[in-house]
Amino acid sequence: MRAKAHKVELLQDLIRTVLILSFISFSGLAFAQAPVGAPGTLSYETNLASTNQLGGASSAQSPFLGSVPAGKATSQVLSITLKDALERGLRYNLGILLSEQTTEGARGQRWQALSKLLPHLTTSTGEARQEINLEALGFPANKFPGFPVIVGPFNTFDARAYLTTPILDLQSLRKERAASEDVRAARYSYQDARNMVVLVVGNAYLLANAGAARVQSAEAEVKTAQALYQQAVDRFHAGLSPEIDMLRAQVELKSRQQRLIAARNDYATEKLNLARVIGLPTDQPFTLATKTPYEPLEGLSLEKALTDAYNNRPDYKAALAQVRAAEARRRAVAAERYPSLSFNGNFGDIGLSPGNSHETFTVAGTLNIPIFQGGKVHGELIQADAELKQRQEQLENLRAQIDYDVRTAMMNLRTAADQVNVARSNVALADRTLSQARDRFAAGVTDNIEVVEAQEAVANADEAYISSLYQHNLAKVALARAVGIAEQAVLQYLGGK
């Protein structure tokens, strides 16, 4: 009974081992065949989102609007240049960090595919004590009289090295090529993510700069309104103007003070958004050291911009690599119908004990020829063809999108430049109008309705100039992104240090 129980235990252990090894082999094959997903890229429509959309989106919608804050806040006020902000964004922005891990994941899958083509060497050492029933192995006692049916118990020692290596495996070879293209696509997507970070950080910095300009403009308007209110008070007390002029000037002053409060709050929020995307602690005080004045961008034609975009856009290169990966995966599926050749061998010592053992070895070559696979390959080919077609269609769509992006960016840049010129001229006219209105009111020629209207005109002209300047500089960043050289050219385009 003890021998039978021992035999059943050994049989159960053997079955469990075979099942585990089979499951591991099947899981590894399925994982190696699984295509790497297209690295995440954002469409250029998202990149050219308006200021409110970029500022109001949550990090759950776009990781590029988040970061991993680095360092602790200090009481020292940091002076952040545009270059500093871009460098921090390219280190700590959440989008770039996630893209790095996506690239690492693609590298890991490529190594798994490569392992199918490399030799596998393992060793095992075991010592067992066993008892064998020869009758169960085909040696019945009635045919071999005098021969013992039960042999043992005896010891067995076995120390052995096992070598398995493929000699010809087209399927694994093509899977490895597909995984290599996936790695290449992930690296291009990482470069595209860097350009996206430049766009997001550049937008946040320009938006904060515009906020600072609005605060300065609002402060100047409050000073002007204060002076005009005091002038109206003096004229009222002197009996030169009715009380309505004084009240009207006071209302205008309160209105300007309210706008100043709102402008300061908006500026503080915009600085928080900038700190958020570049990884600064949210309570770290800092100032903006780079001003972004109006500078026309010249020397870039539409034809050159389109040529550069097709040569430089990392997302386009990533799409090309994804098409090549899909083609390689389809060839790998087709190769399942081809024979494969492998080598297996082992060498070691076996005996009753380590001191009483002898060298033994096994050398074998295996040729595996698929005969009938029940439609498995046919179904996988249908899936591979569908994936390849999708990648090709996405590539063609991206080509059209690049053309659209570049043309739109060029038009936005020209329009914004024209708006800056008009707005700058309008600021000068509004200032002259306000100056003349003040003189007329001081001379008693008219009441202060003209002055209040002139103040509104100055405020509107200042806002139009600030907005058009922001749009012009953002259009430069967007054009650099559309051409695919945002990381290299944005400082040159903006003139930042």
Image: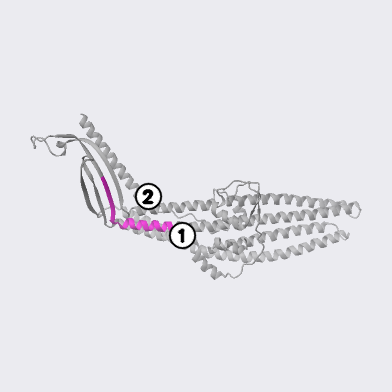
Q: In which quarter of the image is residue 22?
A: top left
Task: Write the residue at 79% across / 52% down.
Answer: 252
**Residue 79 located left or right of residue 147:** right
**Residue 73 located left or right of residue 108:** right
The numbered disc on residue 318 is 1
Percent x, y of residue 192 = 51, 58
Tell me which segment is drawn in magenta: 160-184
Q: Name the residue type under label 1.
A: Ala
The residue indicated by pointer 2 is: 31
Dot 1 crowding, Cα within 10 Å, few <14, some 14–19, many 20+: many
Q: Magenta stretch containing residue 178, yes or no?
A: yes
Percent x, y of residue 165 = 29, 53
Q: In which quarter of the image is residue 452?
A: bottom right
Q: Foreground residue, 51 or 389?
A: 51
Majority secondary structure of the magenta segment? helix
Residue 217 to residue 356: above or below = below
| Direction front: furthest residue | 355
